Image (tube, rainbow, N blue to C red):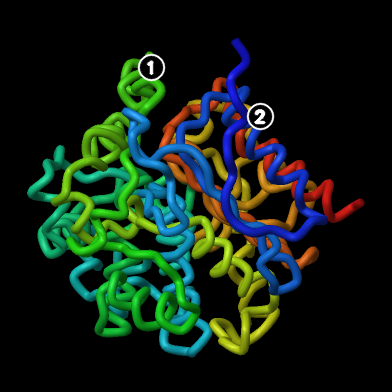
Amino acid sequence: MVEPAVQVYGTWDRQFEPVLDAFRDNFAQRGEVGASIAVYHDGLPVVDGWAGHADKARTREWQAETLICVFSATKGVTSLCAHLLADRGELDLDAPVARYWPEFAAEDKDTIPVRYLLSHQAGLAATPRPVELEDVCDWERMTTMLAAMKPWWEPGTMSCYHANTFGWLVGEVVRRVSGMSVGEFVRRELAGPLGLDFFIGLPAAQRARLAEVDEEYPAVAEMRQIARIPDVVAAMLAGPWGLPWASMPEWQAAELPAVNGHGTARSLARMYAALACEGELDGVRLLSGRAAVERCREGQGQLHDLFVNMAAPDFPCEWGLGYTLNIGGHYGPNPRAFGFTGYGGSFAFADPEHRLSISYVTNLLRWPADPLEGDPRTRSLVDATYGCLRS
């Protein structure tokens, strides 16, 4: 029996119809449950599509305003908060973190620069003890713990993806400089001016719009079983990562700026569209110009990354300042594209050379069989989008 083609809703430019064909193929050939895709080109929305279901039982259709947790794609939003402050001259990325957060100087961390937090080099990729739900929902408890701890390695000599701690570390600097939590900063400085439907710390009133996430298989549990796993990675994986955390209302409501942003593909594509267009979109200027955007994708040097190179030993890992650089080509043919991908597949990125941004969000969490090749769902959408630019 042939499955009926999935109905895709939304609006799109006819030039970009192949993107919607690839989106349909993700449902027909790759097991997609519910998702949305958005593309901006030259500052204009050219794709805004959604399809499928918002729950595992497939009883609720995905809607235009359905929200979903994008996991680590949240880091791109949090990083932009820091870049806004740097662009305004309120935050020096080369200054010691302790200038803004004096308690951070404990355990000889007084010289660690802010850029090490953004590039996963600070040696604080995991907490010194296991944490529970009540810990991660308590901002003061988590930031106090991180400020007091000793780094796992000499900062600046290597990296290890700060999967969870990134949010508290960068977020506390944002809070100390601006006087606002990251969630409030996003509301006032990003979501409000640009009209973004995106939250770090999901309000109770928005929960009715939230899609239910499901894991194809327990990837985090499998990673914990890898032989010779570095101690810091084992400690990191014991934290608030993936399910069942993401289904808990308390976790959703807390401000976890590394992992629990909730929003739409439309909103992420719109935010990155401003970065693709020299910091401005629809008359709203986020960053002062090209130089400020360039700072986001400034490579911080190729280093061995304890987490990334555990999964892909030969991957030439290099972080930008809060963003993933396009070293593996997952963000299309332009090596200068930059963005962030979340656990399970959701992603968003900017390509300033093509004045392009793309975002895709999904409720089916899938760990790619080959990390170097990436998720076929996302690669198909990115390839189709760039194919439309060439046609």
Which residue is outermost to the right?
Answer: 391
* Quadrant where the N terminus is found in the figure: top right
Q: Nearer the viewer, residue 116 or 68?
A: 68
- Position above or below: 230 against 207: above
Neighbor class of circle 1 (other Cα within 10 Å; few <14, some 14-19, many 20+) is few
Amino acid type indicated by mark 1: Ile
Neighbor class of circle 2 (other Cα within 10 Å; few <14, some 14-19, many 20+) is few
Q: Earlier in the sequence, mark 2 or mark 1?
A: 1
50 relative to 148 in the view: left or right: right
The residue at which mark 1 appears reads as 226
Rendered residue at 44%/82% (across/down): 85
Residue 313 on image: x %, y %: 58, 26
- Position above or below: 24 against 390: above
Q: Nearer the viewer, residue 253 or 14?
A: 14
The residue at which mark 2 appears reads as 373
Residue 366 on image: x %, y %: 46, 29
**For numbered disc 1, what is the local secondary structure?**
loop
Alpha carbon distance from label 2 to label 1: 20 Å
**For numbered disc 2, what is the local secondary structure?**
loop
